[in-house]
Amino acid sequence: MDYRRTYRSAAIAFADLVSRIPPDRLDGPGLGDWTLRDLLGHTVGSGLRQVPAALGAPRAPALVVPAPEAYFGMARTAPPALVAAHQAGAAEDARATGVELGDDPADAVSGHIGRATAALAGVGDDELVVTPAGGMRLADWLPTRTFELVVHGSDAAAATGLPIMLDPETIAESLAIAARVAAAIGHGLPTLRALTGRGTLPDGFSVV
């Protein structure tokens, strides 16, 4: 599975969805307490803007996080105060970035995609990227950004009632990460049984 291709595929699918959202829907419901504009802002911030920012920074001094599932799994074991501070910061950034998208978010999203893909062109698979969880190989970190685009792109699709055109390989990459997180946090077998029609997951179950 080509992680660079799936990232670009997810980004293009997200951009296509945004281009079809009527402007009068932007300040309507998005996800939880977020408006749709906030949700788009969070998706841009986490899935697109972080890429050139991280790749333009000095490299991490050491490998700390060995796989995408470890990145998400670490958030579940972090101190509650640290998690709460991160969530508050993410919400503030989502609102600010949503405002920055302006009245033509599709154009702004395209610009972010261009900067992200340009930054990726000059970075090798094994180069170490600084992340909030610690140093990660690019080949392991970028799929976490694809995951953000896929999951929150699907959130935006659900909020608007519009389809998002994600290809099977891109969905498979993010689904595999979610399954590996479930296994890493001790919920692998119940998740497998639910996926194969042999059980159900409790209301509110999440791996992130």
Image (cartoon, rainbow, N blue to C red):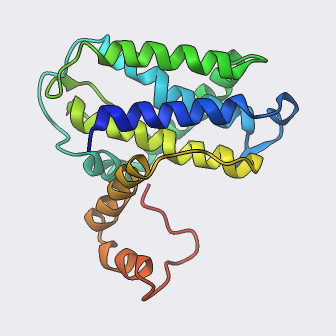
Asked which quadrant contains residue 153, the reply is top right
Q: Please, is residue 176 above or below residue 11 in the view? A: below
Is the C terminus in the top left, top right, bottom left or bottom right quadrant? bottom left
- Residue at figure coordinates x 50%, y 83% from the top left: 200
Please say if 140 is above or below 113.
below
In the image, taking residue 122 as reference, residue 72 lies left or right, namely right
Instruction: Name the one closer to the observer, 158 or 203.
Output: 158
**Residue 147 % position (x, y):** 43, 44
* Residue drawn at point x = 45 percent, y = 13 percent: 115
Residue reaching furthest to the bottom: 198
Q: Where is residue 171 in the image (x, y as percent from the top left)?
A: 43, 51
Along the line of sight, the residue nearer the viewer: 105 or 15: 15
Q: Where residue 119 sits in the image (x, y, percent)?
A: 34, 13
Q: Give residue 21's quadrant in the image.
A: top right
Q: Which is nearer the eye, 110 or 85?
A: 110
Location of the N terminus (image quadrant): top left
Q: Measuring from the top left, give residue 194's x and y in whole percent.
A: 44, 80
Q: In this view, does 25 lie to the left or right of 49?
A: right
Whether residue 192 can be seen here: yes
Residue at image location 38% in from the left, 82% down from the top: 193
Residue 133 visible in the shown view: no
Numbered marks: total: 0
Q: Which residue does the image show at 66% across and 44% down from the upper left? A: 156
Using the image, determine if residue 144 lies above or below residue 192: above
